[in-house]
Amino acid sequence: LWGQDEYKDYCKQHCIGLLRCKREKMCVHPKEIGNGINDCPVFRDDERVCGDFTCHEGCQCNGMVQFCQGQQINEMTGFHTATTMLFLTGNKIRDVSLSNYRRLIVLDVSINKIVRLTAGHFCSNSPFLLWLFVSRNSIDHIDPLTFHRCRYLTWLDLSSNSIAQLTDGSLSSLLNLQVLNMSHCKLAIIHGNVFQSLSGIKFLFLKGNRLI
């Protein structure tokens, strides 16, 4: 077993988005949580955390991953707070404000009825979000600080929306973003400093817009 400081340092470097085994040099991927196998051999954290986990009505679950595609769901409530991945493609969700889903690392709300993204929508209460898919909605505006505190987000898909312009601050805080898909978004204006904070970007998709 490690000392407390050494343990904290290890987790900060290697356990982003993963379950930290208590007092062990080990992290567990969300797909391995609650699968009947003790991947945290000392305290069995990965299985104990699933003791009261319940699947949302109409969804199917694998461990702490919820698959809820095409279930006529219209709001982001009632999901177990220990959910790690949430797939909500093809529902009727209008507001994606997340509340107390602190274990969430993947969220897919593509093909819903979302119109606007406002400040703190995603990571204020889900700070370890890694992948976010919001394509094929009706989004026409992204408020500054929408992605505030999304410091670990690496993949963002906003494609096939109606976003006509990106203003300074629209993509702020995305320091670790590697993939940004904004193809087919009706983009005509991108202000000068929009991409300035995206120091880690590797793939930027802007096909099918109105940029000159």
Image (cartoon, helix red, strand yellow):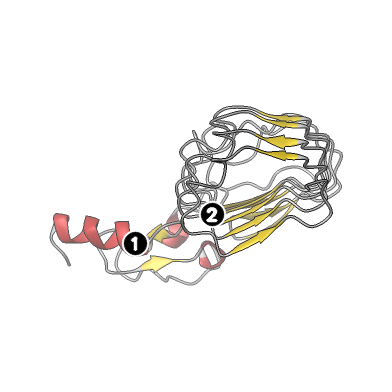
**In the image, is 71 to the left or to the right of 141?**
right
Q: Are marks 2 and 1 in contact (CB under 8 Å)?
A: no
Q: Position of residue 140 (x, y in %)?
A: 78, 32
Residue at 81%, 51% in the rendered image:
69
Residue projecting furthest to the front:
212
Kind of element beneath mark 2: loop
Q: Which mark is residue 184?
A: none
Cα distance, mark 2 to mark 1? 20 Å
Q: What is the number of callouts on the image?
A: 2
Question: Image quarter for residue 141?
Answer: top right
Q: Residue 184 location, x and y as percent?
A: 83, 50
When the figure is inspected, residue 188 is found, relative to residue 35, above or below; the finding is above
Q: Quadrant of the N terminus?
A: bottom left
112 to the left or right of 96:
right
What element does badge 1 sit on? Answer: loop
- The residue carrying pointer 1 sits among few (fewer than 14), some (14 to 19) or many (20 or more) residues within 10 Å by Cα, namely many
Mark 2 crowdedness (10 Å alpha carbons): few <14, some 14-19, many ≥20: many
Say left or right for 112 vs 5: right
Determine whether 207 is above or below 195 in the image.
Answer: below
- Kind of residue at badge 2: Leu
Type of residue at label 1? Answer: Cys
> 132 or 184: nearer the eye?
184
Q: Which residue is mark 1?
A: 21
Task: Give whichever of 121, 199 is nearer the camera.
Answer: 199
The residue singled out by tag 2 in the image is 130
Residue at x-position 85% and y-position 47%: 90
The percent position of residue 88, horizontal first and vertical second, equals: 75, 47
Closer to the camera in the image, 131 or 143 = 143
Rendering coords of residue 2 (x, y %): 16, 65
- Between 89 and 62, which is closer to the camera in this rendering? 89
